[in-house]
Image (spheres, rainbow, N blue to C red):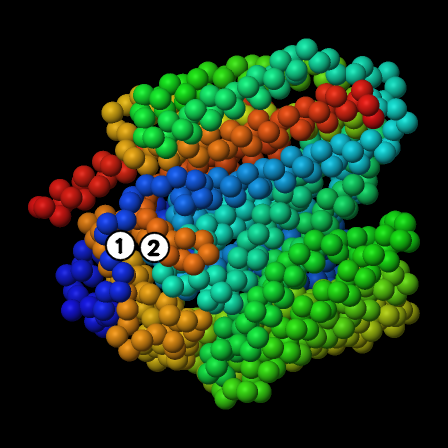
Amino acid sequence: MRTGRTLIDVSRLPTATFGPRDMMWWGTAGFIMIEGTTLFICAATYFYLRLNFGTWPPQHTLRPSLLWPTVQVVLMALSNGPNLLLQRAARALDLNGVRRWVLLEAILCVVFVALRWQEFLSLNVRWDANAYGSIAWATVGLHATLLVLQALETLVFTTFLFSDRIEEKHFSDAYDSAFYWYFMTGSWVVLYVVVFLGPRFM
Amino acid sequence: MTPAVGVDPGEHAALERVWRDRTGLWGWLTSTEHKSIGKRYIITAFVFFLLGGLNAGLMRAQLARPENGLIGPDRYNQLFTVHGTTMMFLFAVPIMTAMGLYFVPLMVGARNVAFPRLNAYGYWVYLIGGTFLYVQLLLNTGPDTGWFSYVPLAGPGFSPGKRVDTWAQTVTFTEIAALVGAVELIVTIFKNRAPGMSLNRMPLFVWAMLVMAFMILFAMPWVASATLFLAMDRLIGTHLFNPAEGGDALLWQHLFWFFGHPEVYIIFVPALGMVSEIVSTFTRRPVFGYPAMVLSLITTGFLSFSLWVHHMFVTGIPELGSSFFTAASFMIAIPTGIQIFCWIATIWAGRPRLTVPFLFILGFVVTFMIGGFSGVMIASVPYDQQAHDTYFIVAHLHYVLLGGGVFPLFGAFYFWYPKITGRLLSERLGRWHFALWFIGVNLTFFPMHLLGLRGMPRRVYTYLPETGWGPLNLLATIGAVIVVLSVVLFLVNVALSRWKGSEAGENPWDAPTLEWGTTSPPPSYNFAYVPVVEGRSALWDRSPDHPVVTGLRTDMREVLVTTLLDAEPDHRHRHPQSTVWPLLTALSTGVLFITLVYTPWGLVIGIVPLTISFIGWGWPTERDHQEQLREEAAA
């Protein structure tokens, strides 16, 4: 006995999908919107505060050094190659491929966190020196927070991927992790231009 | 719980076994069910409403006569700051989100929200944040710089100590809760709608919650950034708002109001959805002009981001900018007007029943329109410059927020209480509640227009007899007493009806939306069979044989995921189990944020438990649980 007639039987529908079909992808997209807005606010504040100064950086403040930040941004941009391969491997349900590329992503995350430390030093200004130093540190620091969280998450996920408990849905999780990585690296390219190249042109 | 009429008892038992929470305290602490979380969210937010009201009552008592000595200036500053912070951050936004988290899954035919653990986490974080604020107030170290904490007053130079840091962290807690709630709602609405509920068939309340959720997504990061910057200026010596080192005090106002103005609509837009559902049900016809209503909601959402500077007309911004924001402020009247005319047309063409929810909607129209008219007045720069920082603004904002938010909310309580509890609220007590509330609100706040016009400034703890403000203030305080009486009546009604109210049945109002198609209160799994939706008014339009979806597993938590536009069945999704990790993660978040108020080392201290709890949360244990369930079933 049941309330109504069966109009749709869903018992044969798949249990894992990729991209916008998947709920987790939309959850990730939601957090990208939140974090993207926050990073945008940092950049907007950067430009807003610029109006309070005659020169940028302010007098007696060094420009940021470019070596390590440029290494970082180039590596981040290049990491999207393996990231694309990770998404392909995930879609193909290729466990070895996913393990390989996620492991590489985890290693890169650790490298990027270490390089981020060098980037803070490359700002050549303390956060409490003036408003310029404050917003530069805030912008790099906020992205650094996201980077550390991503590194932690990727390390845990990598550890799990090498266990024997993998199911189909975990390929979709790997796909979404790669999707988030595009945001992390893409947003950093923009912020690199603002924070590290900006003082040379503004 | 007994199964709904027509549901196979065996299937009901299987679904209950898989979906219901554990019993007792542990079950309560680990629940991730949207109705359980939604209910406690609504109750908590209402408790904060009462506490915020208590603050207001104390302020009104102090202002009842000139040179009153009941409350000193320092305590008064804390009271108005905590009152505003409570009503905006701990009551209005959370309760609207909570109503969505309870009802949206039911209205779209889903079994739970998309990310149930995140939902539980949001609630616990919110509770910790709110409690933190009130502990500080009781310790006489509550924030005292207003709910918007303008710098430089709120900066380290003028507000030493930890009061403002408390405020900033409280706001951070509520931002997190609101943001995760918004993501929940968006994904649930986009991906968990019952087959047939294409976007153009969604109930207007669901549309309103969707618009609200997107507004939260783009508005909350602004106040999050503002409070982060403020905390940095105060804790580690940055200069973002310090003009002496190139920072900017006005930057605070831009950041705050870019959030603060949409915030008003984050409260108002869900209320519009509630009004539409109530008007439709009690006129027994679909709301007139569905496309116009939806487009108006979306337009209101967009326009609300272009008004923030009208809070800053006296800061000396360029005239051209002022003119633009005046025009934008006037424009918001257009989508609001369209909706009001659509409701009038619906009532005109329908057969209105003057039940208590409907009375509150009529009260909303009158009160909100008064707030709207004074809004149009202060959108004009010359007038605003006169009225700014006077009681005229206090009158306006209360008319808008109480009229536009709380009136519909009370209507929604009467409307949906039977669904949540299975019992109807008393109509008789409800009518008294409405009458006292309507009279009390107008008696409290209308005189404030006149007080403002006579020059009484906001945020003063007393005034001299010679000002002549005494009689109108006394009138406002009498109004506040009537408001208190009305709320007490409501609480009595809620308590009495919980035990002695008439049995509601599935659909006591003959309402059209899906939540009324299951038992009251709904079972843990919401719907035994996911319904198939055949029109905008899901229950009114459905075929006599009630078509449903079958094929979802009953031996594990499984939900149907549908396509974004047309809600066609796409795939099945294994739904996570209840767990204690969201609570532990929220506690860790609390440790991190609260320690950060006192020392930058809080980051180091707090990050360890937070990392552990995140790992615990994220580590997949679902397969173990499924195996355990199957073994139990086999046994």
Q: Is mark 1 on a helix, strand or loop?
A: loop
Residue highlighted by disc 1: A10
User: In the figure, B183 relative to B282: above or below?
Assistant: above
Q: Residue at left 70%, top 53%?
A: B305
Picture quarter containing residue B625?
A: top left
User: Where is the N terminus of chain A found, in terms of image quarters?
Assistant: bottom left
User: Where is the C terminus of chain A found, in terms of image quarters?
Assistant: top right
Do residues under tags 1 and 2 come within 8 Å of each other at their CB atoms?
Answer: yes
The amino acid on which the numbered mark 1 sits, given as a three-letter code, is Val
Q: Residue at left 25%, top 25%?
A: A164
User: In the figure, B535 relative to B257: above or below?
Assistant: below
Q: Where is residue B80 in the image (x, y as percent from the top left)?
A: 70, 56
Q: Residue at left 43%, top 24%?
A: A85
Q: Where is residue B151 in the image (x, y as percent from the top left)?
A: 78, 42
The amino acid on which the numbered mark 2 sits, given as a three-letter code, is Pro
- Neighbour tally class for label 2: few under 14, some 14-19, many 20 plus, Cα within 10 Å: many
Q: Can residue B2 be seen in this view?
A: no
Is residue B160 toward the left or the right of residue B599 in the image?
A: right
Is residue B24 toward the left or the right of residue B338 in the image?
A: left
What label does residue A19 carry, if any?
A: none
Q: Is residue A188 visible?
A: yes
What label does residue B569 carry, if any?
A: 2
